Amino acid sequence: MHSKSVAIVTGASQGIGRATGVRLARDFDAVVLAARQEEDLARTATAVRSTGAEPLTFALDLRQPCSAGTLIQGTLDRFGRIDALVNIAGAVPEIDLFEMTDAQWEDGMALKLHGARQLTIRAWDSLEAQRARSC
């Protein structure tokens, strides 16, 4: 259980995040998929499983303060390690820049930047441990 190589992909329910999760399943034994849409995550997990990798899904909103800890701790509890973290989640609304409100912009940045920062901070010790083992 604890010898599998593990990648985490955020924004994994659709688009680039989904494609990245499925692609990484060819290189990692397990791929942890995180996004808000549980049904879409399940479809991504099926695609990951079809490559032979083990999927683990977390339906959560990385704008919420506790989500990064939940994702990282859940991954470590299940696999005991994190080898790669790919932060794809987040986008600003697809509207004209001049029509966008400050609140809409800040909401997008909370997910894309702050969520990624929180995940990186929480995953750092495990990422460093795997890097040290590979040297």
Image (tube, rainbow, N blue to C red):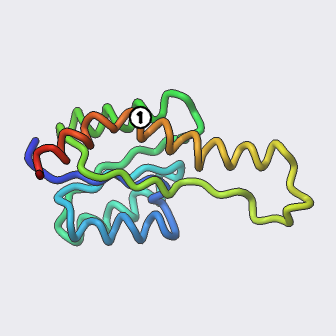
Q: Relative to 55, say whether 95 is above or below.
A: below
Q: Relative to 135, say whether 64 is above or below.
A: above
Quarter of the image with the N terminus is top left
Residue 67: percent from left, percent from top: 48, 34
- Residue pictured at 40% horizontal, 55% vertical: 86
Q: Relative to 128, say whether 45 is above or below.
A: below
Residue 129: percent from left, percent from top: 19, 39
- Residue pictured at 32% horizontal, 71% vertical: 23
Residue 90: percent from left, percent from top: 59, 54
- Residue pictured at 36% horizontal, 64% vertical: 21
- 85 sits left or right of 134 in the view: right
- 94 sits left or right of 134 in the view: right
Pointer 1: residues within 10 angstroms few (<14), some, or many (20+)?
Answer: few
- The residue where tag 1 is placed is 121
Residue farthest to the right? Answer: 98
**Amino acid found under the numbered disc labelled 1:** Ile
Residue 56: percent from left, percent from top: 29, 49
Quadrant of the rendered image containing residue 28: bottom left
Residue farthest to the front? Answer: 135
- Number of numbered tags placed on the structure image: 1
User: Element under label 1?
Assistant: helix
Foreground residue among 69 and 52: 69
- Residue pictured at 12% horizontal, 52% vertical: 134
